[in-house]
């Protein structure tokens, strides 16, 4: 096995070739369904990798990703929605912003920054909470954000949702972001910063006793995760062209947790593989659901997979390890 | 000025007085033993001294700074590090990574450095690795560097904890029962390590059950019993005190020694 392992540089090149090959093939096929599915899968990969950083590296148990995705999505749409239709769709929007049109990469960055700032603010209050207390707090956050989105209908059109979001999220943009975010999380994990985060996860008090500021590191991981979630949330409606307060909710939070538990909390390779596996798996199951008329099978199977992993292999596929890649 | 100055330090849990008016000071370069029977409050004293638990009353000064209300990480930044009675290693990480984590606060760089590979990042990582390898060598753990911390024997795990603590470059090291569960050979090697570190100028406070080891290593002893300080003096004088014998050694002094 050791001899087969790739160096980080080789792994990076492999990833670039793989992602661009996939995108070329999917675009070449000309099949809109495949293109959308690939875009959503890659976004799932980004979400899973960022959550394995927030939760897996530091040992927190945050379910808050969908909340930050919702923030990022609505903020980005404010800047990408066609200027001519903003007055009708978002009557409460100040004239200054209504006149601005930004390309998606910029708008998504603004969305990510807003989500990261909110993550930092909220994180200051909640990251000291241990395990399931943090889970409950962030679960509440999802509902709070959804309620805001529902009621700020001057910006969000409330429960009717925003339709006709420009489909500006190209596969290439998503592919590049996926690679960048994987590299970002990889670099953190394999630097002193990442080791310090893992130390906090393994034993917070011991880590603090030799000078590691656990609160700061957890807040950093939470803020970064919120920012990446905000970015992914901003991309998503620009793939499917609709956005509603219910787009990113509890089921997504559950699916993301399932992905990182299956992959091994803290394993980037594990998160990628599990995200691919669960995306492809649930899409195939969805087709089965439609052809047989038995709806909800997907959620049941994901839940069963999660429970089986928790029972049989609580550390997931790889634990903290990165299979097939040498660490240095 | 003493390096560590403890004044009337007390800790109570509800109505239970775990530590009452502990008073002692430690000079730079000292090797002090903290002894007492089970439940005497030794580990509580360590917890309060290192900030793991807040003090109920009293004051702790470290190198002239009042640290009574500081967090463990702040105390560590000032130069105070500890090990734990129940070993707290990072089991999913290798021995070297454990020790490298110990050097983070001292030599690690920020997020921006690490993500964008800013100047200084590579050197910082190299330096952390050098610090870790140096500590592994000093604690005779070089051969285990790439093993998972969980795979090591009990005595080796204890030494990893010491190596990790050393990597943070402490000036005062608190060792909580480092010899517990060790074989006699391991105890011997540990004693050598502790006295070597002390010879290099490191101040050490040692909680230990093994009186033979404490008597051989420590110049001064603090004896606690039921949270109260019984004695604080030169080792040979303390061990001769009748009240210490009565409380800690009982009538079996000859057997224990």
Image (tube, helix red, strand yellow):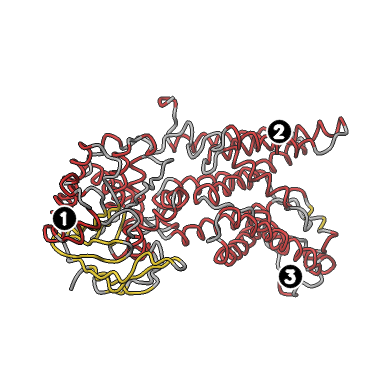
Q: Which quadrant would residue A163 be assigned to in this image?
A: bottom right
Marks 1 and 3 sit apart, C-alpha to C-alpha, by 76 Å
Left or right relative to B166: residue A204? right
**Dividing the picture into quarters, in which one does residue B24 lie?**
bottom left
Chain letter for the residue marked with disc 1 in the picture: B
* Left or right, B145 with reference to B245: right
Give the residue pinned by disc 3. Answer: A99
Respond whether the residues carrying marks 1 and 3 are from the same subunit: no
- Compare marks 3 and 2 and give the one earlier in the sequence: 3
For disc 3, the chain is A
Looking at the image, the residue that sits furthest to the left is B236
Quarter placement of the N terminus of chain B: bottom left
Q: Residue furthest right?
A: A293
Residues at marks 3 and 2 touching, judged by CB atoms closer than 8 Å: no
Viewer-nearest residue: B107 or A147: A147
Q: Position of residue A67 (x, y in %)?
A: 68, 58
Q: Secondary structure at mark 1?
A: loop
Q: Report the Cα–Cα distance between label 2 and label 1.
A: 64 Å
Q: Is residue A98 above or below residue A312?
A: below
Find disc 2 in the rendering and name its residue. Answer: A281
In the rendered structure, the answer to whether residue A114 lies left or right of residue A85 reads left
Find disc 1 in the rendering and name its residue.
B218
Q: Which of the two residues, B248 or A315, is positioned nearer the viewer here?
A: B248
């Amino acid at each position: 096995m050791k001899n087969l392992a790739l160096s980080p540089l080789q792994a990076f090149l492999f990833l670039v070739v793989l992602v661009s090959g996939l995108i070329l093939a999917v675009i070449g096929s000309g099949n809109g369904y495949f293109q959308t599915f690939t875009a959503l899968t890659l976004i799932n990969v980004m979400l899973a990798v960022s959550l394995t950083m927030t939760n897996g590296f530091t040992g927190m148990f945050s379910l808050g990703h969908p909340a930050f995705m919702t923030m990022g999505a609505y903020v980005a749409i404010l800047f990408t929605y066609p200027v001519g239709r903003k007055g009708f769709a978002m009557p409460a929007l100040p004239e200054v912003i209504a006149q601005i049109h930004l390309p998606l990469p910029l708008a998504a960055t603004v969305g990510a920054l807003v989500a990261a700032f909110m993550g930092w603010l909220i994180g200051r209050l909640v990251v000291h909470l241990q395990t399931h207390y943090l889970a409950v707090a962030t679960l509440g956050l999802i509902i709070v954000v959804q309620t805001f989105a529902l009621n700020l209908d001057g910006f969000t059109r409330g429960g009717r949702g925003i339709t006709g979001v420009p489909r500006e999220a190209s596969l290439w943009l998503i592919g590049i972001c996926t690679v960048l975010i994987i590299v970002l999380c990889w670099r953190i994990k394999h630097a002193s910063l990442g080791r310090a985060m893992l130390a906090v996860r393994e034993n917070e008090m011991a880590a603090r006793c030799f000078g590691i500021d656990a609160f700061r590191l957890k807040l950093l991981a939470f803020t970064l995760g919120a920012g990446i979630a905000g970015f992914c949330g901003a991309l998503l409606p620009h793939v499917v062209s609709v956005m509603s307060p219910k787009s990113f909710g509890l089921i997504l939070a559950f699916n993301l947790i399932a992905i990182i538990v299956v992959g091994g909390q803290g394993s980037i390779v594990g998160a990628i593989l599990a995200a691919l596996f669960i995306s492809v798996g649930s899409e195939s199951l969805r087709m089965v659901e439609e052809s047989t008329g038995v709806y909800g099978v997907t959620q049941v199977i994901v839940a069963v997979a999660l429970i089986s992993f928790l029972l049989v292999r609580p550390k997931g596929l790889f634990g903290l390890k990165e299979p097939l890649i040498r660490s240095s | 000025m003493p390096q560590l100055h403890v004044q009337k330090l007390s800790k109570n849990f509800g109505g239970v007085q775990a530590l009452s008016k502990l008073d002692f000071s430690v000079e730079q370069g000292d090797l002090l033993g903290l002894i007492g029977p089970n439940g005497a409050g030794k580990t509580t004293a360590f917890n309060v001294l290192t900030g793991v638990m807040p003090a109920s009353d009293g004051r702790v000064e470290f190198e002239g700074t009042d640290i009574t209300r500081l967090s463990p990480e702040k105390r560590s930044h000032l130069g105070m590090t500890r090990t734990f009675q129940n070993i707290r290693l990072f089991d999913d990480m290798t021995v070297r990574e454990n020790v490298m984590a110990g050097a983070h606060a001292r030599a690690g760089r920020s997020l921006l450095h690490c993500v964008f590979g800013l100047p200084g990042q590579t050197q910082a990582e190299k330096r952390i690795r050098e610090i870790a390898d140096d500590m592994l060598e000093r604690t005779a753990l070089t051969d285990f560097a790439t093993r998972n911390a969980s795979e090591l024997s009990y005595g080796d795990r204890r030494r990893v904890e010491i190596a990790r603590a050393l990597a943070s470059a402490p000036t005062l090291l608190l060792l909580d029962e480092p010899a517990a569960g060790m074989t006699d050979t391991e105890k011997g090697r540990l004693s050598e390590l502790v006295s070597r570190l002390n010879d290099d100028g490191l101040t050490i406070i040692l909680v230990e059950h093994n009186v033979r080891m404490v008597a051989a290593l420590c110049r001064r002893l603090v004896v606690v019993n039921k949270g109260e300080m019984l004695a604080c003096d030169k080792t040979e004088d303390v061990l001769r005190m009748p009240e210490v014998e009565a409380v800690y050694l009982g009538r079996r002094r000859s057997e224990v020694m």
